[in-house]
């Protein structure tokens, strides 16, 4: 017994044994070296199999819908959890890179001054050699144009 999409299940009998084919077999296809047959019982079994596959697909889809509806009830909580996990992931990544590359946390002050010593850009530094920059901006120096080896 074999199966293909075009003919379904069938019994293939070589030409050497065609004289032994029972009368209740119905010829379905003739090949060069064999003939393919079906029987009523084989058609019934095929229908059972196909119905079972269809029913299986229906059950699978029903389970999917049920799961989707259950998840839908918790969408807001899941979204909040995902946000918290993403925040933890970012903070862990920053902590890892800070330790690995010697990054430090900025010190904040109340005065109107920005003072950066050996400032670096993590993306540029990862792509090529990078020269750290110092920068001071205050009431007297409000604008600074940076040029040099990092932007060439």
Image (cartoon, rainbow, N blue to C red):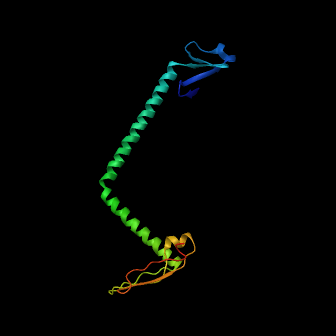
Q: Quadrant of the N terminus?
A: top right
x and y percent of residue 133 in the render? Answer: 49, 81
Vertical relation: 115 (above or below) 122: below
Residue at x 53% of width, y 73% of height: 125
Q: Residue at x 49, y 26 (%)?
A: 46
Q: Quadrant of residue 65?
A: top left
Taking the spot 43% from the left edge, 69% from the top edge, the residue there is: 90
Q: Position of residue 148 (x, y in %)?
A: 53, 77
Residue 128, placed above or below residue 30: below
Q: Please name the residue shown 38% across and 44% down the image.
A: 63
- The quadrant of the rendering that contains the C terminus is bottom right
Residue 44 point in image, percent of width and height: 47, 23
Q: Residue 102 at what x, y percent from top left?
A: 51, 80
Vertical side of 63 occupied by 79: above or below: below
Total numbered badges shown on the rendered structure: 0
Of residues 72 and 45, the one nearer the viewer is: 72
**Residue 23 position by quadrant:** top right
Q: Nearer the viewer, residue 81 or 25?
A: 81
């Amino acid at each position: 017994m074999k199966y293909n999409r075009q003919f379904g299940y069938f019994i293939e009998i070589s030409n050497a044994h065609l004289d032994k084919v029972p009368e209740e077999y119905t010829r379905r296809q003739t090949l060069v070296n064999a003939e393919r047959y079906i029987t009523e019982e084989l058609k019934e079994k095929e229908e059972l199999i196909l119905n079972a596959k269809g029913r299986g697909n229906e059950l699978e889809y029903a389970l999917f819908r049920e799961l989707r509806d259950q998840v839908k009830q918790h969408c807001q909580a899941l979204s909040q959890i995902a946000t918290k996990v993403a925040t933890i992931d970012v903070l862990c990544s920053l902590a890892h890179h800070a330790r690995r590359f010697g990054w430090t946390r900025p010190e904040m002050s109340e005065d109107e001054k920005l003072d950066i010593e050996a400032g670096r850009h993590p993306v540029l530094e990862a792509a090529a050699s990078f020269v750290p920059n110092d920068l001071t901006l205050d009431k007297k120096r409000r604008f600074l144009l940076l040029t040099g080896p990092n932007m060439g």
